[in-house]
Amino acid sequence: MKDEKRFQIFAHIVLIILSLLAILPMILMVMSSFTDNDVLIAEGYKFIPSKFSAYAYEYIFNTGNSVIRAYGVSVVLTTVGTALSLAITTMLAYAISIKDLPGRKWITFAIVFSMLFNGGLVPTYMVYTNIFNLKNTFLALLLPGLLMNAFNIMLMKSYFVSSIPGEILDAAYIDGASETMTFFKIVIPLSKPIMATVALFAGIGYWNDWMNGYIYITKRTELYSVQNLLNRMMQNIQFLSQSSSNVQNANSGLSAIPLASVRMAMATVGILPIIVMYPFVQKYFVKGITLGGVKG
């Protein structure tokens, strides 16, 4: 008992240290975003700055860039993308979890193969722009991430195999339930942990995605997500700072831009919704990861 208690104390200490290593940088990021830019440059990053300022946020929201609209695009994209991705992933994962499914091994092989190899950026870009004509459309933000994630499929498939007793499914079949009824009435209610886990993965992927907007959205800037908008603002600031010696009165203009604190403010604006949402799905997330990784 003493050895077990010592181990628990040691494990708690280690977990507390790891938690602090994850939380403290976020706190430092938020506090730096509320620090006066000149103080931040002179004194560096501090948890309790000597002078607070919200000018970085005023700059972000008042520079003519519609952050609110970008937030709306990100919210719609994340909501629709997560729902569709979760539906497709759940149905495919359940299908390949059925042992007597014809062609099950080949389908599983194709999914695993896609985890290791892909066509690359250039062929993907040509397919989406030349064949599907998705450039400068909302679907260009939605579809590339919607075409499933092999890791999520295999994670959910492992959960179905290891955590849903086959006897329950057999009993449903004996009672006359169809495959569709079994899926919606039995499988889905028993799969809330893994569905919450996959939904979190898909949601974070859509929310943090900036690559699709950077590649496919070249004209319709009103389709920028919050990540694309913040990335463009950061590029504009860097361009001004690098070209200040060649632009008349650029120094006076740059002095009004909080170059250091605005970076922290942009990171805070981008990550805030994920931080707010995570505590509500944490319980299901941990359980889904644990049970979904038991066996393949």
Image (cartoon, rainbow, N blue to C red):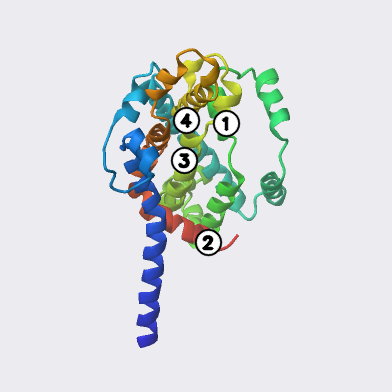
Q: Residue at x 68, y 26 (%)?
A: 125
Q: Which label's residue is closer to the chain start, 2 or 1?
A: 2
Q: Position of residue 83 (x, y in %)?
A: 46, 35
- Distance between the Cα atoms at labels 3 and 4? 12 Å
Mark seen at residue 162: 2
Mark seen at residue 227: 4
Q: Nearer the viewer, residue 196 or 220?
A: 220
Q: Residues within 10 Å of mark 2 (few under 14, many from 20)?
A: some
- Left or right side of 70 for 112: right
Q: Residues within 10 Å of mark 1 (few under 14, many from 20)?
A: few
- Asked which secondary structure carries label 2, the reply is helix
Residue type indicated by callout 1: Met
Residue type indicated by callout 2: Ser
Q: Residues within 10 Å of mark 3 (few under 14, many from 20)?
A: some
Residue bearing the label numbered 3: 204
- Asked which secondary structure carries label 4, the reply is helix
Q: Position of residue 113 (x, y in %)?
A: 71, 47
- Distance between the Cα atoms at labels 2 and 3? 26 Å
Question: Where does the C terminus fall, quadrant-wise?
Answer: bottom right
Q: Position of residue 206 (x, y in %)?
A: 49, 35
Q: Which label's residue is closer to the chain start, 2 or 4?
A: 2
Residue bearing the label numbered 1: 211
